[in-house]
Amino acid sequence: MERVPIRPPSPPPRGPAEGERLALRFQRGFLAGQRLSALPWQDLEKILRTSGDSSPVLTILQETVFHPLCMKYPPSVKYRKCFLLELIKKHESTGAESLDPLYEALGEVLTAKETTHCYKSYLLPSGDAVTLRENVAIISQGTTGLVTWDAGLYLAEWALQNPSIFCNRNILELGSGIGLTGIVVCKACGPKTYTFSDHHPCVLQQLSENIRLNGFFPETEACICSPEKSTGQEPGGPNITVAEIDWDQVKKERLAELGADVVIAADVVYDPELIRSLIGVLQKLSMGNDGGKAPEVYIAFAIRNPETYHCFQAELAKVGIAWQTVPGPQKNLFSYDQHANICILRLLI
């Protein structure tokens, strides 16, 4: 017998502003697949204890599991199951009567089939969202490039707070991965052109799918892509190119053709061999466009191993590339680890 999907519950009555704000905090973290331990469970417990009202739980359910983005582009089955179990636990701890929508939602998730991919959605200040399809496993198909890393989120948030660096300029991103940083810049910072680049074929395929998912449509690697008009993108948006770039093989002439005013990269400083390849690309970029001014370069990375960071600095010094530390973002709009040691360097090539 065909299983009939459950119907989302009717929105609960409008509650206190505090409960609504809390629900939106849960919404932002849940849609982005934030670690469950980082969600504001203690604040929920406090509201439930003081109010004796179950409506905040229904509001959170409506703004997370039954949010339109989750219904269309769901986080992983495991993530949704663990979230609902924790939400039920918090509600039951108050001794309140059972809420049928909670158990119906859990039943729906328990019968769902786990897949190798999931979706994460990041809400922008404009109200727009960036949705990415990514792999559930950190390492798959021989690469770590099929998931979003903290430095990419950090760089994207920094870009939102520094749009003048990107506005009406030609941007090249090295090691774009599945596209979070670049899609945020294209949607919110008004670049003239944006070149996403990577080398692994599976990453390039997933990158192109995510660009399309967010309202742009690359047809071929060399194609310049305009915003898809049916998605509500503003006319005159950036031209977008997806390029395969092998750092060890790319010629300076090929880089010059891209005409980059600004070059960015996130989480590309974690392996000494990769560092040397990256610096080789930076040296080629330092020659500028047709002998003109070299682009501005911003690299964001998490310092997981201080020795690797010092290796990067030493390799930069060997080729005469100076660097400056750039102040990071002032807010925590995206769900990167607040305890991670992430920095952004401006490289003076």
Image (cartoon, grey):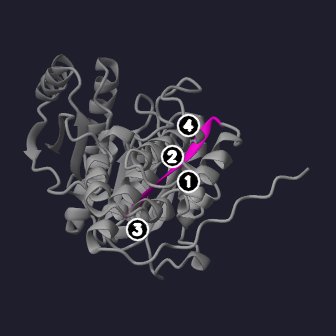
Front in this rendered view, residue 85 or 210: 85
Is 31 placed above or below 10 here?
Answer: above
How busy is the neighbourhood of tag 2: few (under 14 within 10 Å), some, or many (20 plus)?
many
Q: State the residue position of label 4.
A: 78
Q: Earlier in the sequence, mark 3 or mark 4?
A: 4
Label 1's element?
A: helix
The three-letter code of the residue at mark 4 reads: Lys
How busy is the neighbourhood of tag 1: few (under 14 within 10 Å), some, or many (20 plus)?
some
Is 320 placed above or below 306 here?
Answer: below
Q: Position of residue 164 (x, y in %)?
A: 21, 69
Q: Earlier in the sequence, mark 3 or mark 1?
A: 1
How busy is the neighbourhood of tag 3: few (under 14 within 10 Å), some, or many (20 plus)?
many
Taking the magenta stretch, the answer to whether it contains residue 119 is yes
Give me the disc on residue 84: 2
Quadrant showing the C terminus: top left
Q: Which corner quadrant of the image does residue 324 belong to? A: top left
Real-space Cα separation, disc 2 to disc 3, in angstroms: 32 Å
Q: Are marks 2 and 3 in contact (CB under 8 Å)?
A: no
Q: Earlier in the sequence, mark 2 or mark 3?
A: 2
Label 3's element?
A: helix
How busy is the neighbourhood of tag 4: few (under 14 within 10 Å), some, or many (20 plus)?
some
Start-end of magenta stretch: 115-123
Q: Earlier in the sequence, mark 2 or mark 4?
A: 4
Q: State the residue position of label 1.
A: 102
Q: Are marks 1 and 4 in contact (CB under 8 Å)?
A: no
